[in-house]
Image (cartoon, coloured by chain):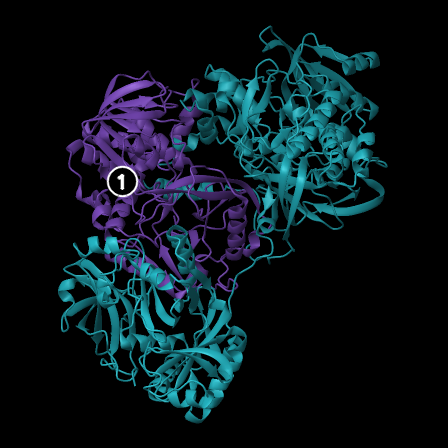
Amino acid sequence: MTQITRTGALIDSTKPITFFFEGKRYSGVQGDTIASALAANGQWVLSRSFKYHRPRGVLTMAGQDANTLVQIGNEVSVFADRHPISEGLEIKAQNVNGSLEKDRDFFMNRMGRFMPVGFYYRTFYKPKGIWEKIWEPLIRAKAGLGTLDINAPEDGYHDKAYGWYDVVVVGAGPSGLAAALEAAKLGGSVLLVDENPQLGGAATYARGMNLQDLIDHVEAMENIETWTDAVCNGWFADNWLAVIQGNRLHKIRARQLVLATGLIEQPAQFRNNDLPGIMQGSAAQRLIKSYGVTPGQTAVVLAGNDDAYGVALDLVDAGVSVTVCELRKEAEGPLRAQVQTVGLTIHDGCCIYEALPGPGHKHVRGVSIAELDDAGAATGKQRMLPCDLVCMSVGYTPTYQLAVQAGGKVGYDDKTAMFSITGHNADVGLAGSMDGRYALERCVAHGTAMGARAAARLSEADAPEAPDKCATSPNYPWPIFPHPKGKDFVDFDEDLQIKDIKNAVAEGYRELELVKRFSTVGMGPSQGRHAALPTARLVAKHSDRTVAEVGVTTARPPFTTEKIATLAGRKFTPMRRTPMHSRHESAGAEWLLAGNWQRPAYYGRGNAKKTIALEVSNARTNVGMIDVSTLGGLDVRGPDAAEFLNRMYTFAYAKLPIGKTRYLLMTNEAGTVIDDGVACRIAEDYFYITATTTGVDNIYRNMLWWNAQWRLDVDIANVTAAYAGVNLAGPNARTVLNKLTDDIATGAEDFPYLAYREGHVAGIPARAFRVGFIGELGYEIHVPARYGGALWDAIAEAGAEFGIRPFGLEAQRVMRLEKGHVIVGQDTDGMTTPEELDMIWAVANKKPFFVGKRSLELRNKTLRDRKLVGFSLDEMPTAGLEESNLVIKNGEIAGFVTSICQSPSVGKVIGLAYAARSDSETGAKITLRASDGSLHQATVCSPHFYDPDNKRQEM
Amino acid sequence: MVLALLKYGLSRRYPVREEIPRTPDLKNHYDVVIIGGGGHGVSLAYHLATKHGITNIAILEKGYLGGGNTARNTTVIRSNYITSQSIKFYAASMRLYESLANELDYNLMYSRRGQLTLSHSDGVSRALRLRADSGTFLGERNEILDRQQIKELVPSLNLDIEGRPILKGLWHPDAATARHDAVAWGYAIRACDRGVELHQKTQVTGLTVDRNKVTEVQTNRGNVSAGAVVQCVAGHSSVVAAMAGLRLPIRSFPLQAMVTHPVKPFLNPMVSSTALHCYISQSARGELVIGGGSDPYELYNTRSTLDMKESLAASALEMFPFIGDLKILRQWAGITDMTPDYSPVMGRSPLDNYWLDAGWGTWGFKSTPASGFYLAQAMAEDRVPEMIQPFRLDRFDTFDLVNEMGATAASH
């Protein structure tokens, strides 16, 4: 059934669009949502409910309830009443076993009595083990709504933007428009956001409200930006707002915020109140006015306020025959008077006691109404009214979510039967109906006052008087009519009925949070938008408290759903590459990740072990080069530079001569080793120091943190990225360097081990120092980063005649292990002291202070029973030993292997491990446990496996 | 089994009884006052009452039962720690959990999903190997998986994360999840069955200390005296201890998490990535539960932040690229009490009758049964059992630490 030409504020009937729902072809028009287009085609069932698989349809037409959730492609849980149709769009129903029309799981609807609230806590676990074996898999298969395709590609462009405004107004209804206008008039930049496609809020569908003048004024203001289809989805500290528009997340700082988020209309509770064809009054009005859809032929309007009569009149105008069922016994109001003039039947003092389902529960076919007694409960005096549409207009809640995120507390006014909000952040103002101003004029006046208040707070002026709250509200206090057979839903998302809430309280889960957690009320996709009010009322009643005492559960961000891709935005994975990166790439480097740095593991695509061994032997017997640009570099200068290092590091630096280097060992406050490096003294007041690649950023931060307390006269700069570095090492290193420099004397006496020199290498200004990490004659040459590539090329060229070859991190690890040099972070853990590493020599105990000194003094009194020892095995067991394998002693864990390799230079399997102190002497046997559980004996030896006298590195 | 459901369905009167009793009036004196009605507090009460016959107990809870970190954690139960002491303790807790539903006659929905911890670097691979080897040596099931094995275990996982390819995984098949609220409720119900009093909305406002004993507990509902007092107030351990004049080596940081809309199950194990500071599991309801590392600064406030949500979303999307259109439903925060060695403080305090159950960091939920079991034994016998001796407070004076730094980051 296609309706004849439709007229609605949001649609263009001249532009037809074809789309598919559940494989069936439908036609709608430009501007239609999925739900409005389907409704125009007479398709009212949109989904099946979570637990009972009951057919569900339009409830709010506002994108706020789970009834309309459908799936589009790999996007699950799309609000059909908000998502636009487009040509060829394919839409599927969610959570159906079979099809939306014929859902095999609809039998669950009859099982309700056997599934009381929280039933799953009471059953399924006897006998022991049956839950995991039988029940859980069965129940788990029923979880969830939509289905994700795990092979779907990541698509769509999502990004982020930042904004700063003097005043942000959320909600472009009467009070929001007025607030924006007033704030703008008083100067300052104003942003007005609204989640709907057009400005005006309730005025776009409610009867008798025209805001065109106000909208024109707002649009004429140059200092107001208005965003539609933009939802303010979260309030965070200091008015930091998340506003989502399309695929963009705007992060906005508002100096002042005005929330004019209006009201959310609430359903009434009666049996079968979830049938398709039963909707909020405002939903019917939205269908008629925005989309030109007539929601039925014969309607019953359940009235609890005067707005209901506006709905009735709108239905009449759309050609619907209407009967009003009025909850109040003595209702009055201007719109009711009009309805009376039109001559509609009004049943005063009556409720809907039960809605009657059509075939398959797919639509309402009538209601049974009952007269109310003096206590407001349904009596036996009932009559049946046939209808295909029920509109509920019985009350609202404020849209309090953002206000609550901003610190607001939700209270309840028994006189008006309405939630109220207090205690929110002072830089947030509430305007209009969400703060108790319901009549249009008062709403606008309040918006104006709150706009002026926001402007006044910016200039510290006095805020103007705001109009008082209305004495009455549009809320009928108790639109809850339990039925002995139930299905009187409080929470549509979770299929929870009145008795479920009542029973949760009766079982002792009396606190509202416990009711929520026990029954799951409010935990579904609509996050309690339509369940919070009836739940609070029911819990209050059944626990003999007031609604205010019961309260509502905390509303946390986001306000409405937001996509993971929107939050993620353009993904940035930080990666760091050295200036020589392209050289490594063309040399065929295999990459390793060190912190964020990409470093060559080894060069060439051949057999890794052989390649690494080749790189090692070339450096040992000839000359090699390695890119050490990633090494941390810090410039420490100022009169207190030496004192500063003395405090930060364990060694002593006051007397370090200019032009010399000294090892750096850092412990934290607990005395645990956390970093090492080399200090080069450039001048009396100037040190250039290195730190580990992955440690430097923390070390730098630590240094600033400490000096914020010490206030030493020293300047610390992290120059890691400013320098590129090459370690040139091997017996031929001196000859190669000699070719490249005129102003650095390279002779063994001019430039001895541990010396620091400045000059030029390949014409590039350079810092050079002699180090021995891999145990050969070696120079570390640091140059400004932009010359890194040139330095690399020059050294490679100069070394070509000797057969120089670059080596990677793997070869460096092997060679340093052969020398017994520890890598902080690999050979140390969160408890390692210098003593355990045999590095007491690097701790200057005579200093009055260094970070960790006091702790080390304590720890040295009761040493832990472990030491880092060197060990060797003649050959690798077939089970394979690797780093982190355990050291076992007397059936207990005594330690673990920190480093191990097949040493090309020593010809054995060598390694470092934590072992018991009693096993730390050379010659002791320790037992290593391979990951397969097999045990292997190793012999403890000096960790200085290669050139123990350091002849080679000191030549 | 299903008979139980028939019983509910066919009985006219439902519910049968009020299983969580209403808050009674405070008496003047209790043998034991437990500060904090979360999982740990009610577990302790349950074990005191059922294993040691101590039933004159008041649990004082400032909010509602299980409303603190018990309600805010992401329900991971595991034993894949670094040190022997921790592995043994958390393994004991897992064993208690495995039969807890039947012990309490309350279905906690204990579900053995297994936990997969991912490594993206050599250093982390080594750390995972140490955890695997230590656990296996002590009888716990752990295994290092290569990329192919990871792919088979979690086909939906993206192994080739740009810039951070997955290298190895630590597979802990016995890791489990359970319904967090139900743990607190089950213990509370059975403790109350034995006569323990649960006082909700009862806030401790001060402690009177005289001659090295806590002589009076002050509350918003009046004062009580007690033979012994114990604090089980994760998130506010330092604050409550300060009322007793104690200074704990604890710093408190918020820890945030979020859930998505429910979708049909596609992810069985709990997956965590150390480099991305993100862990993901799919709940019994079908929601993805996504959590990360603690906030970088100390705070006693369970507010949510936008930046944490953004970074968690980005990380989750790296691991599972097809969830871009999945929507976040809710985010929240808890407060973690961190000690210098990341291990808890359990046992005696410097005061004669004041006991501590604190510093659980991100591991409070998984320890709920064992902390109650062993602390009850310690209090009842006035002798701290060997199992929890390593977690004594004075270890920080002697540096005899139980170092678990590195067993967390993103694998709570």
Picture coordinates of residue A99, whole percent (x, y): 62, 42
Q: Quadrant of residue B182?
A: top left
A615 vs A709: above or below: below
Considering the image in quadrants, where does the N terminus of chain B appear?
Answer: top left
Q: Colour of chain A?
A: cyan
Residue A60 in view, yes or no = no
Q: Position of residue A245 (x, y in %)?
A: 68, 45
Q: Tell whether A783 sits left or right of B30.
A: right
Nearest to the observer: residue A438 or residue A464: A464
Q: Please state which of residues A892 and A632 is positioned toward the viewer in this rendering.
A: A632
Q: Drawn colour of chain B?
A: purple
Residue at (50, 18) in percent of width and height: A540
Residue at the image position 52 percent from the left and 19 percent from the top: A548
Q: Is residue A710 visible?
A: yes
Q: Residue at x 54, y 39 (%)?
A: A237
Furthest-top residue in this view: A374
Give the residue number, with chain letter if any, for mark 1.
B370
**Residue type of the residue flagged with mark 1:** Ala
Badge 1 element: helix
Q: Is residue A535 above or below residue A614?
A: above
x%, y% of residue A299?
74, 22
Q: Residue at x 42, y 91 (%)?
A: A803
Quadrant in the picture for residue A632: bottom left
